[in-house]
Image (cartoon, rainbow, N blue to C red):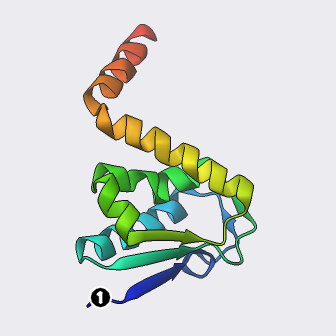
Amino acid sequence: MTQEITIKVADLIGSPLCIATEDGDKVFEILKSLLQEGQSVVISFEKVTMVISLFLNVAIGQLYGSFNEEEIRAKVQVEGLSGDDMELLKQVVDNAKRYYANLSSYDAAWRDVGEGDE
């Protein structure tokens, strides 16, 4: 049986501020490798004083590109976020699920927007 592993975000990134994409990437890479090994993970936001959607997109939203929703729900637990930040995480997850479910149409839309700028 696998044991639950806790990732303390503030300790991992060395800051109570979850605002940098590089820091989100650190969290994502560890989460991804643990999930690939079949581990259950608790993401602890204890000691975190600020978290923004960009960080959550990179750290957690990206998981939906590598794993299905059932897997993530079964294996990933989030602790220590305030009510407002949990609501932000829910929005990030909903957006990530929509994005990864329709990847080609989103990418085509982005290409169309980019070509309009030339």
In the image, 19: left or right of 39?
Answer: right
Query: Residue visible at 72% across and 58% down?
Result: 83
The residue pinned by badge 1 equals: 2
Q: Amino acid at mark 1?
A: Thr
Give coordinates of residue 79: x percent, y percent. 60, 72
| Label tally | 1
Give coordinates of residue 36: x percent, y percent. 24, 71
Query: Residue visible at 42% across and 85% down?
Result: 5
In the image, 95: left or right of 11?
Answer: left
- When the figure is inspected, residue 44 is found, relative to residue 96, above or below; the finding is below
Query: Residue visible at 41% across and 18% down?
Result: 114
Identity of the residue furthest to the right in this view: 49
Give coordinates of residue 76: x percent, y percent. 42, 69
Residue 113's image quarter?
Answer: top left
- When the figure is inspected, residue 16 is found, relative to residue 111, above or below; the finding is below
Quadrant placement of the N terminus: bottom left
Quadrant placement of the C terminus: top left
Query: Residue visible at 31% across and 79% down?
Result: 39
Look at the numbered disc 1 and give the secondary structure of its residue: loop
Decide: few, some or many residues near mark 1? Use Cα within 10 Å; few <14, some 14-19, many ≥20.
few
Give coordinates of residue 7: x percent, y percent. 50, 79
